[in-house]
Amino acid sequence: MASASSAVSIGIDFGTSNTVVALATEDGKVEAIRFDHGGKRHSVYVSALCFWEERPGSGAEAEGGPWAIEQFLEGRHIHRFIQSFKTFAASASFNSTQVFRQRYRFEDLLAAFLRTLARHGGDRFGFEAPTIMVGRPVRFAGGNPDEALAMQRYQAAFERLGAGHARYVYEPVGAAFSFARQLEHDATVLVADFGGGTSDFSVMRFSRQGGVLRAEPLGHAGIGIAGDTFDYRIVDHVVSPRLGKGSDYRSFDKVLPIPNHYYSNLARWHQLAMMKGSGDLRELRELSRTALKPGPLQDFITIVDLDLGFSLYRAVSDAKVALSAHDQVDFRFNSGGIDIRSTITRNDFEAWIADDIDRLGATIDKVLDEAGITAHEVEKVFLTGGTSFVPAVQRLFADRFGDERLTSADQFESIAYGLALIGHSPDPDRWTAARQG
């Protein structure tokens, strides 16, 4: 196993849901660092933070990755759990969030998260490597993402850790470099990277000259649709109606629908915990007293009260994954006295995500247009990320490029490996997003 001191390049794939770090040594070998937790070794570090105080006023302590989830679920202290905070990186409307008596900006959260990552990586990971390559989306999540703001925040966080020399590379470019090691001849490659919050696409031209691999970026495009979006489609059609969405309450002599905005909190499981302090939970309690069918709303309240969001979304994610292998699955969530059951067919699921698939298709058209090529001129399509296994996504690419041109690799590690390889290349600056924009 390489150590931080022997690594000439570190690749950091900071993702919406998960983070992976890879080390490249002088001889060109690359490997992911592993984290020991729960008796197992993991290369994936959950992109989550949990803050807590041992006693009121003692100051916030922080944990990240699987240790953050463990701390959150144990609930021994008053805590603040934050996940998927990458989605706020490019949001000008997100200034800071309150954690006990301290306000945290995005760069504060990212720096705190990276510190936990380095601590659990031990001597296998540090910021003293001469070259650090950090992945970034082609298009950041959000309705009106401010790319310059996001990069300022990234840089501020890494500077605090002594890594002001970090370079930033489009995530699908990192995946492309990982894949290119397998190429035996020159090829034009479309790389599709499906993360938790965004899906990014790059067209690359790879060639070998004098035994040296060379690559030319031809085009990039991205969209804020990915695995979390597909999860929410299941929640919206299966779970939310069981928790009162679409039902009514009585206000004086009128019968009115339960406002849908409460159910938007179900888009991310960690948002449910935030309902406790936003006033939404208090309003739901009041609505349940006048609801025509109070039971579903009371179940919604129980999920928030008992912090069952993580278990709920784990059941949803398991169902989504199972639908990639089966024509139908029996969804069941049973916890805290709540029992939600439903049979979900693949046809149902594909109808729910049809608009999302169409928008992904439009983004593929966009990257091909930017590259100035047709689908016929793409010789290989490299798919990475768990969502790439969804049959509707597979069909989208097969219909455009043909099954024979599709290939995939490790759904989690390929970007970090490629980033580390770029850092080991003769001219890593050539691959930074600033040079390719």
Image (cartoon, rainbow, N blue to C red):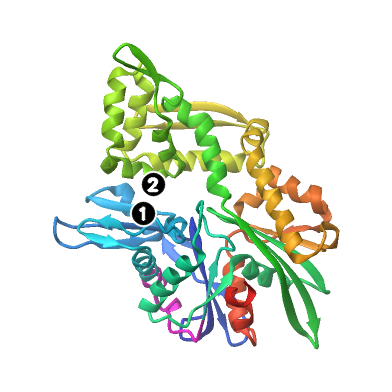
Q: Which mark is residue 115?
A: none
Q: Quadrant of residue 26?
A: bottom right
Q: Decide: marks 2, 1 in contact (CB < 8 A)?
A: yes
Q: Quadrant of the C terminus?
A: bottom right
Query: Where does the image place residue 25, in percent across and percent down from the top left?
Result: 57, 84
Q: CA distance from mark 2 to mark 1?
A: 7 Å
Which residue in the rendered view is the most extreme toward the right? Answer: 376
Query: Where does the image place residue 56, in percent across and percent down from the top left?
Result: 14, 55
Q: Quadrant of residue 257?
A: top left
Camera-side residue of 92 and 188 = 92
Q: Quadrant of residue 405?
A: bottom right
> Image height check: is 422 above or below 404?
below
Residue at (80% x, 47% y) in the render: 399
Query: Where does the image place residue 324, in percent across and percent down from the top left?
Result: 65, 42
Residue topped by disc 2: 270
Mark 2 crowd level (few <14, some 14–19, many ≥20, 10 Å Cα) = many
Residue topped by disc 1: 82
Q: Which range is magenta?
A: 117-131
Sequence-earlier tag: 2 or 1: 1
In this picture, residue 87 sits left or right of residue 253: right
